Image (tube, rainbow, N blue to C red):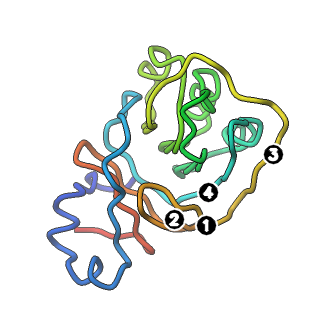
Amino acid sequence: MAGLPLATAEACDANPHLILNGELRALQPIFQIYGRRQVFSGPIVTLKVFEDNVLVREFLEEKGNGRVLVVDGGGSMRCAILGGNPVQQAQNNGWAGIIVNGCIRDVDEINGCDIGVRALGSHPMKANKKGYGEKHVPVNIAGTRICDGEWLYADSDGILISRTEISV
């Protein structure tokens, strides 16, 4: 991330026209904050899975190059689709952050990682390993449609999605 981190509140105040035309959207405040990196941003990679984490792990084994993985887990609260080992790998591979519309586990381990993680909550049960899911597809999370290649900005105030990279 070049320069100073973008504050989401300032970005909203400075770009009312982008909000009006739908190019800048805020996710509903449904996510818990995990990981040591409270502020993060980057280009989005999308993934759609349900109670299965094979594709999540595959993505995080790749070089992140400052990207943010947005995982639509269907909002499932029945198991965790992300745990400590893949998050550690994501940190080591240069991912900026991971957003999970679902649950995580190994919270203490994840909170020790220098990466931004947002999820609905934590759950001790692990996910299936069948490899079902879709990569690079538009997902609908927290009241917002998110597409591969858009930009995500997260801080303590919330999460913004932008069609293009923005600066204040």
Mark 3 is on which residue type? Answer: Tyr
State whether residue 8 is above or below residue 107. below
Mark 1 is on which residue type? Answer: Pro
The residue located at (57%, 16%) in the rendering is 124
For numbered disc 3, what is the local secondary structure? loop
- CB under 8 Å between discs 1 and 4: yes
Q: Residue tagged by mark 3?
A: 132
Q: Residue tagged by mark 2?
A: 146
Disc 4 to disc 2, how far (Cα)?
8 Å
For numbered disc 2, what is the local secondary structure? strand
Along the line of sight, which residue is nearer the eye, 121 or 91? 121
- CB under 8 Å between discs 1 and 2: yes
Residue 38 position in % (x across, y down): 32, 37
- CB under 8 Å between discs 3 and 1: no
Disc 3 to disc 4, how far (Cα)?
14 Å
Which of marks 2 and 3 precedes in the sequence?
3
Which of marks 4 and 3 precedes in the sequence?
4
Disc 1 to disc 4, how far (Cα)?
7 Å
Checking the image for residue 46, the label placed there is: 4
For numbered disc 1, what is the local secondary structure? loop
Checking the image for residue 126, the label placed there is: none
Which of marks 2 and 1 precedes in the sequence?
1
Which of marks 1 and 3 precedes in the sequence?
3
Picture mark count: 4
Corner quadrant of residue 95: top right
The residue located at (42%, 55%) in the rendering is 142
Mark 4 is on which residue type? Answer: Thr
Mark 2 is on which residue type? Answer: Ile
- CB under 8 Å between discs 4 and 2: yes
